[in-house]
Amino acid sequence: MATRTQFNADQWVRREIVTAEMDWLGDELCRRTGRPRTAAGSKGDYLHLSGAHRSQEFIMQSQLCTNRAYTKQTGLTPDQLRHVAGFDFTPGNTEAMIAQSQRLLAAMKAGLLDEVLEIFCNVDGNNVVDGWDNVRNLAATADSSHLWHWHLSLDRRYCADRALMARIIAIALGDDIRPPASAQRQHGRWIIDD
């Protein structure tokens, strides 16, 4: 386990990028729900030494990394290698947590969030973390902190996709996100024919 001093001195931590779009996702979710900005986050602290709350560059290069395989992707640009791909949101009460978790998990399973690799959440208020691995199309689970906040791991190629961030907000908050009748899915994305 790294100390705060070791973590803060790590060159790969300092190179990580939280995209403007990921920041906007946090800003907008907090604004629309009346939550403080600290209710949303992307970049992990010194206790997050692997996974989507770290850049892939950190995962591949830092001596502090504890798992070099988890959330690793191929075919990324140099900027995408530096993107932090994890997003957490704490709704603030059980009712909102359950409702947002149910909508996000259902959307993942329905193919409406193919750019999201995994979700951890709580859909029924019990003591079991619910989740979905979109890569393997399997149920998933994580540590108990996800009973009170939901987590998304994004495909690093989409961390700068503002339309994806708007779709995540719409789904989480229950806005109507059905595609128009003329839309078709190609390569996991909706294509609108005019």
Image (cartoon, grey):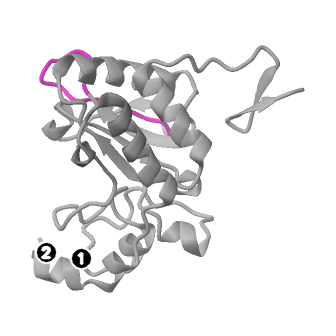
The N terminus: image quadrant:
bottom left
Camera-side residue of 72 and 6: 6
Q: Quadrant of residue 55?
A: bottom left
Q: Is residue 179 above or below residue 51?
A: above
Would you call the spot at circle 2 few (<14 residues within 10 Å), some (14-19), or many (20 or more)?
some
Are dots 2 and 1 in contact, CB under 8 Å?
Answer: yes
Q: Residue at x 17, y 41 (%)?
A: 143
Seen in the image, is 185 located left or right of residue 77?
A: right
Instruction: Tell me if 30 is positioned left or right of 72 in this view.
Output: left
Q: Is residue 69 visible?
A: yes
Q: What secondary structure is the magenta-colored segment mainly?
A: loop
Provide the residue designation for mark 1: 64
* Kind of residue indicated by mark 1: Leu
Task: Give x and y (percent) for residue 48.
Answer: 22, 61
Say the numbered circle drawn on residue 122: none
Q: Which residue is mark 2?
A: 2
Q: Residue at x 40, y 72 (%)?
A: 16
148 on left or right of 73: left
Magenta stretch: residue 125 in it? yes
Give the residue at x 37% y 51%. Answer: 86
Residue drawn at point x = 12 percent, y = 82 percent: 5
User: Which is nearer the eye, 10 or 90?
Assistant: 90
Q: Which SS class for mark 2?
A: loop
> Does 150 appear above or below 184?
below
Q: Say if the magenta span includes residue 141.
A: no
